[in-house]
Amino acid sequence: MATEPKTRRRRPAAPRKSAAKTAATVAQTSTAAAAPAGTPGANAALMTRREAAVARGVASAAPGVYAARAENAELWDVEGNRYVDFAGGIAVLNTGHRHPKVIAAAKAQEDLYTHTSFQVVPYEPYVALAEKLNALAPGDHAKKTLLVTTGAEAVENAVKIARAATGRPGVIAFTAGYHGRTLLTLGMTGKVTPYKNGVGPFPSDIWRAPFPDARAGITVDDAIQALETLFLTDAEPSRVAAIILEPVLGEGGYYPVPAEMWRRLRAICDAHGILLISDEIQAGFGRTGTWFAIEHSGVVPDLLTVAKSMAGGYPIAGVIGRAEVMDAMAPGGLGGTYGGNPVACAAALAAIEAIEEEGLLARSTALGETFRARFAEIGARTAPFRMWDIRGLGAMLAVEFVTDFDTGTPDAALTKRVIAHALKRGLILLACGMHGNALRIMVPLTASDAVIEEGLAIFEAALADAVAEDAA
């Protein structure tokens, strides 16, 4: 669970821990023998070409680094520079770059066929993946699955299915939630910059309730009371089809939803005939130590949206839900030309098998303990009174930076400097949070202990660099 914010005292050092490495994880340690030779100046040349050819709105966290090769938790750029990857393609690579099982399964499928469109000529990999997802999703009720291509597409279809099943238009989302960048999903996304600036208006019948945030003084009771008030003022319950929530806020700062919040939302949904959607796109497939993050609460949702690490780097997404709800749409109402691509389905089945066989759920829990302990040490030693909070579930963790513990003022500038210095030293990191002052950890669960420790050492050095600049 999230740690409470600290004020006016130094975070105590914690004993260093090391996640136990499974035999399978050892086997997945990088097989790279040497860095590619690379071409001097190639990154700058590609940046020039990009600026002339790619839309300005497509941003990159490491714009001066162009990938040439990657293996497990390591990446080499076109100039031959090596990086430890703690970003994992934005939580897509729980099984690492180019997991051998995933690559082998995709190549085997490519030798058979790469596309027919499931809406034209169906195929077994789609059916097999749907069966597997139905078995993995929480709840002992009958389930069915729709496969699509992107996370935003999954969320849009979940809303469409919920509307068809309930005959209602409304959706309730939460502050700081992130559900995508299409117009419908932007209506649910609770963060303006950089996603929503200048592209409204957004769809109607979408309402927002406050997320329980101890730092902001919003308790679960406060959040539920605000939701009940919303029912009285704007969102008549009989018009609400679904309530959607990420079990751990992604772009919003890696805040886990308290189990009590899930239980009370479940009760509210049951009382009013509303469907409960858990958006597991970033938190799913072992990131938090369970297949799906909502499992930590014991609550069973009606629908789950999935994507990212489901296929180890191949583009695929889906909606898993109660069979009777999923069947609300008439034939032809669901689908998409590339939805459930056979190569991506094969990759997903292999990635899920790797998570099972290599004990990556337990590995995630162990990695989370390692990162918590090491971050506490590093914060106390290198940046006293600047690392405000360490929070998350399993290996889905974030550390937040502030100017000082007395005021707890978010320090996005320090966070940016840490990321920049880390990149110079060979570590890829990403920020998150409403104020951009948190670093999130999305390292592949298959990363070796040695690579994890290397990344943490680089992080500490980068933090020291950033703090020294701050003091200068």
Image: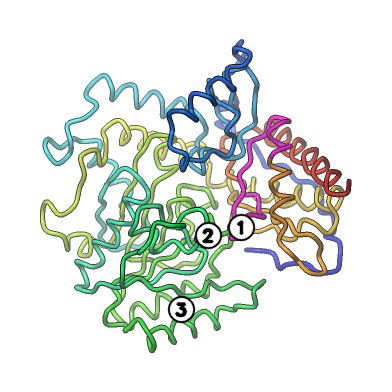
| Residue closest to the eye, 329 or 271 | 329
Amino acid at pointer 3: Arg
Q: Are marks 1 and 2 in contact (CB under 8 Å)?
A: yes
Residue 62 at x, y percent in the picture: 59, 35
CA gap between label 3 and label 1 equals 21 Å
> Could you tell me if the residues under marks 3 and 1 are in contact, i.e. CB atoms within 8 Å?
no
Q: Which residue is painted at 78% across and 53% down in the image?
A: 376
- The residue range painted magenta reads 420-440
- SS at badge 3: helix
| Left or right, 387 with reference to 82 | right
Asked which quadrant contains residue 425, the reply is top right
Quadrant, the N terminus? bottom right
Instruction: Name the residue: 64% across, 28% down.
Output: 83
| Residue indicated by mark 2 | 248
> Measured from the top left, where is residue 456 in percent x and y?
73, 39
Of callouts 3 and 1, which one flags the residue occurring earlier in the amino acid sequence? 3
- What amino acid does circle 1 point to? Gly
Residue with the mark numbered 1: 392
Q: Quadrant of residue 75?
A: top right
Q: Earlier in the sequence, mark 2 or mark 3?
A: 2
* Residue 331 as seen in the image, left or right of residue 378: left
Q: Quadrant of residue 401?
A: bottom right
Q: Residue 38: image x %, image y %? A: 60, 13
Name the residue at 46% across, 61% down: 246
Amino acid type of the residue that numbered disc 2 sits on in the rendered structure: Val
